[in-house]
Amino acid sequence: FSNPVNILKVWQGGMAFHGGLIGAAVSMYAFSRLNEFKFLQMADVVACAAPIGLFFGRIANFINGELIGRHAPDLSWGIIFPYAGVVPRHPSQLYEAALEGLLIFLVLFALARFTSLRQTPGMIAGIFLVLYSAARSFAEIYREPDAHIGFLMGGMTMGQLLCIPMAIVGIGTIIYARHAANAKSA
């Protein structure tokens, strides 16, 4: 609040997924309004593509030694990251790549391709939000919390805490999509 220009200095930190999601949603909403697209249909398409970016982003995190996992001295596949000491750690970035990227992509692909859910605008986007929240919350169990934040209430990490409202929005989107589809067919 004291220096809002720092928000624009992405080279001094990076962008967390949750903030990026909010920015993307606002941009998609503005774009859809200006171009007379249906926002929820656009959100469904973007939700189907998002896991691909998440997958490669987590692989990049692994290569760069960012967002490292918690200590795992007895883990046979533990990784010693160059800037994180000599204790092996969970390769949490790879867990997240598999869950947030690969698994969610496969589930959404199957739902969009082989079910009628793609006919219900917002359904795929809502499912993405719920699945991402669950996958991220699980993977955070193995990820070291941000050093400047640490653990929060109940031993939760910031990522887990931010997934709660995201899951609620996802569930709300699913409910809204079902309600709108039922009203349309009635």
Image: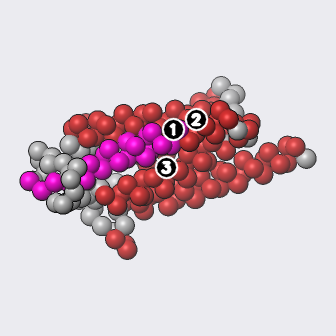
Give the amino acid at mark 1: Phe
> Which residue is located at x 59 percent, y 52 percent?
170
Q: Which element carries disc 3, helix, strand or loop?
A: helix
Tell me the quarter of the image containing the N terminus.
bottom left
Q: Earlier in the sequence, mark 3 or mark 2?
A: 2
Mark in front: 3 vs 2: 2
Q: Tell me residue 156's x, y (percent).
A: 37, 67
> Which residue is located at x 65 percent, y 32 percent?
113
Question: Which mark is drawn over residue 105?
Answer: 1
Look at the image and give the residue range highlighted in magenta: 86-106
The front one of 52 and 153 is 52
Badge 3 is on which residue?
Answer: 132
Q: Residue furthest top?
A: 35
Q: Disc 2 to disc 1, how far (Cα)?
A: 6 Å
Badge 2 is on which residue?
Answer: 109
Q: Earlier in the sequence, mark 1 or mark 3?
A: 1
Q: Is 95 left or right of 74, judged from the image as shown?
A: right
Q: Disc 3 to disc 2, how far (Cα)?
A: 14 Å
The front one of 165 and 3 is 165
Residue 59 is covered by the magenta coloring: no
Q: Is 43 left or right of 184, judged from the image as shown?
A: left
Give the amino acid at mark 3: Tyr
Give the amino acid at mark 2: Phe
**Residue 65, above or below 86:** above
Label 2 close to label 1 by CB (< 8 Å): yes
Q: Tell me residue 26's x, y (percent).
A: 54, 40
Q: Tell me residue 31's x, y (percent).
A: 59, 30
Q: Tell me residue 15's x, y (percent).
A: 35, 42
